[in-house]
Image (spheres, rainbow, N blue to C red):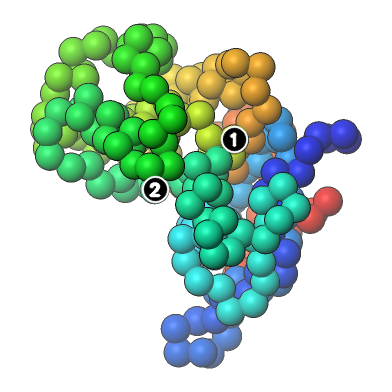
Amino acid sequence: MSGAEDFLRARGLWRRKPRGEGWLLSDVRLTVRGGQRLAIVGPSGSGKTLLLRALARLDPLDRGEILWRGEAVVGNRVPDFRRHVIYLHQRPVLGEGTVEDSLQAPYRLNVHRASRFDRQRLVEWLRLLGRDAQLLTRRQRELSGGEAQIIALLRAIQLQPQVLLLDEPTAALDADATLAVERLIDVWMRQDDTARATVWVSHDQQQAARVSTKMLALQQGRLQGGGSC
């Protein structure tokens, strides 16, 4: 993707196993550029979730650094970084109250106070997913695992991050709902004339091919496929 701006860069990431016997991540180098859609595939236990969490600066590293637009993400840079880079967990945890309560909650955080909750846009996205606005009135504790994944996705993309880190975001959905989520993310990527990027972890090679412009493989903590180019 020549000419695209470097958003997120991982330089030489190493993460030791809990007992110090070997490595969970080994010299991982990865660049995420504006407009890019990366997919990371690999067997269970290869470190895919660990890598996404490291990219989001959610877990410590033994070596290496994360850069955002060329600047190391350390200290007081971390809160602003997390406004631009959002990690979506495979098994999201929702709180009490309604779905709309959950979607409004991020705007009470200092980092998002300048943003505005847009209910109409959420209703439009729900329509793309084949669902209606009634879902917003549902109690969070009544949601299925698949519905919780959908709400977690909406909660993330409404904040308009520049990089979305997706950890098996359709694992609890059926085939039709999975394709609908893929279409929604594609629409979101193209909206507002804003450069965005996704890093999508999937166990499904066919899905990874559908949602990416570049596919990388993680094997025993080592990234294959030219992640640093």
Disc 1 target residue? 162
**Residue type pointed to by label 2:** His
Residue 51 lies in quadrant? bottom right
Residue 196 position, x and y percent, is 63, 31
Residue sitting nearer the eye, 106 or 48: 106
Q: Is residue 39 left or right of residue 134?
A: right
- At a point 44% along the width and 83% down the height, the residue shown is 18
- At a point 58% along the width and 64% down the height, the residue shown is 74
Q: How many labels were placed on the picture?
A: 2
Q: Is residue 3 above or below residue 194?
A: below
Secondary structure of the residue carrying tag 1 is: loop
Q: Nearer the viewer, mark 1 or mark 2?
A: 1
Disc 2 target residue? 89
Q: Is residue 205 visible?
A: no
Residue 14 position, x and y percent, is 63, 74
Q: Is residue 33 left or right of residue 161?
A: right
Residue 173 position, x and y percent, is 34, 32
Residues marked 1 and 2 touching at CB (< 8 Å)? no
Q: Is residue 38 left or right of residue 52?
A: right
Q: Is residue 165 left or right of residue 112?
A: right
Residue sitting nearer the eye, 19 or 202: 19
Secondary structure of the residue carrying tag 2 is: loop
Q: Is residue 19 above or below residue 74?
A: below
- At a point 39% along the width and 22% down the height, the residue shown is 116
